[in-house]
């Protein structure tokens, strides 16, 4: 999993600039590799499995003493804790609801941190993507929500999410921005030239 290259980021910036010439809306795009490190998840699973090991070993045979069982339990916990930290395994251990909740929470924090709630006319829009969670969300301020129902973004988000799953994050961003631009141009057309917020893609470390 890799974040977008410089040329990819420039393509996103260009798409935003094109859209903002025809609408009063202010678009900000944010991309993160992962919404959370979920450090407690590997420890939780390792702890649960390590607690089960002594009972399983005793069930199939009682040749190990208490001291040895304790060492086996500790060893199991340490090994599984390290194994479950591997990205490919870690992601599969995290329930979808937890992954989506973390990503959604980060999206809302970014809406505030990028000052999208302070635009003139309350016309800020955030397009947020978290690659590890395969999560895409569009958040808009009241000025946009008043004229466009949230349901209009569902198809755009679904298409973008599919592209993220396929590793086509750049194309997903460009297509999403273009599709949003068509709706914004119609319902919130440009009345004057302005650029309150930066157009570049914000990449979270």
Image (cartoon, helix red, strand yellow):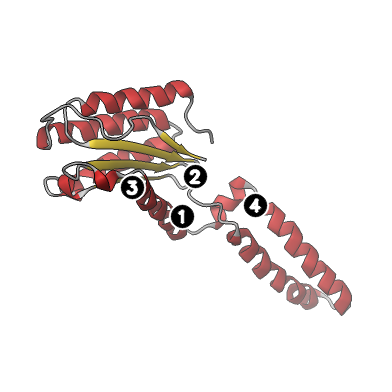
Report how far apart the C-alphas of labels 2 and 3 lie in the structure. 20 Å
Q: Dot 1, how many residues are within 10 Å of its Cα: few (below 14), some (14-19), or many (20+)? A: many
Q: Nearer the viewer, mark 1 or mark 3?
A: 3
The x, y position of residue 175, in whole percent, is 30, 30
Q: Is residue 7 left or right of residue 74?
A: left
Question: Label 4's element?
Answer: loop
Question: Label 2's element?
Answer: loop
Which residue is pictured at 24% across the width and 23% down the height? 18
Residue 139 can be seen, yes or no: no
Is residue 73 placed above or below 187 in the rendered structure? below
Q: Quadrant of residue 160?
A: top left
Q: Which residue is mark 3?
A: 111
The x, y position of residue 141, in whole percent, is 22, 48
Q: Dot 4, how many residues are within 10 Å of its Cα: few (below 14), some (14-19), or many (20+)? A: some
Residue 79 can be seen, yes or no: yes
Q: Nearer the viewer, mark 2 or mark 3?
A: 3
Question: Label 3's element?
Answer: helix
Q: Which residue is mark 1?
A: 99
Give the number of callouts: 4
Is residue 183 placed above or below 43 in the rendered structure? above
Q: Are marks 4 and 1 in contact (CB under 8 Å)?
A: no
Q: Are marks 2 and 1 in contact (CB under 8 Å)?
A: yes
Q: Quadrant of residue 69?
A: bottom right
Q: Are marks 2 and 3 in contact (CB under 8 Å)?
A: no
Report how far apart the C-alphas of labels 2 and 1 lie in the structure. 9 Å
Report how far apart the C-alphas of labels 2 and 4 lie in the structure. 14 Å
Q: Is residue 65 left or right of residue 10?
A: right
Q: Which residue is mark 4?
A: 85
Q: Which residue is mark 2?
A: 132
Report how far apart the C-alphas of labels 1 and 3 lie in the structure. 19 Å
Which residue is pictured at 38% across the width and 35% down the height? 163
Q: Nearer the viewer, mark 3 or mark 4?
A: 3
């Amino acid at each position: 999993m890799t974040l977008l290259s410089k040329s990819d980021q420039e393509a996103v910036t260009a798409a935003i600039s094109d859209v903002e010439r025809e609408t009063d809306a202010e678009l900000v795009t944010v991309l993160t590799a992962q919404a959370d490190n979920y450090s407690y998840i590997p420890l939780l699973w390792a702890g649960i499995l390590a607690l089960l090991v002594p009972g399983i070993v005793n069930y199939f045979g009682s040749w190990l003493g208490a001291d040895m069982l304790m060492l086996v339990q500790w060893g199991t916990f340490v090994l599984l804790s390290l194994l479950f930290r591997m990205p490919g395994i870690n992601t599969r251990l995290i329930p979808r609801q937890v992954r989506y909740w973390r990503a959604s929470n980060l999206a809302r924090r970014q809406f505030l941190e990028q000052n999208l709630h302070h635009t003139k006319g309350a016309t800020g829009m955030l397009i947020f993507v978290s690659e590890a969670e395969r999560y895409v969300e569009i958040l808009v301020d009241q000025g946009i929500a008043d004229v466009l129902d949230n349901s209009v973004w569902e198809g755009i988000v679904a298409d973008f999410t599919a592209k993220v799953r396929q590793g086509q994050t750049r194309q997903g961003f460009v297509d999403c921005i273009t599709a949003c631009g068509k709706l914004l141009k119609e319902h919130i057309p440009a009345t004057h030239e302005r650029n309150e917020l930066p157009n570049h893609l914000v990449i979270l470390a």
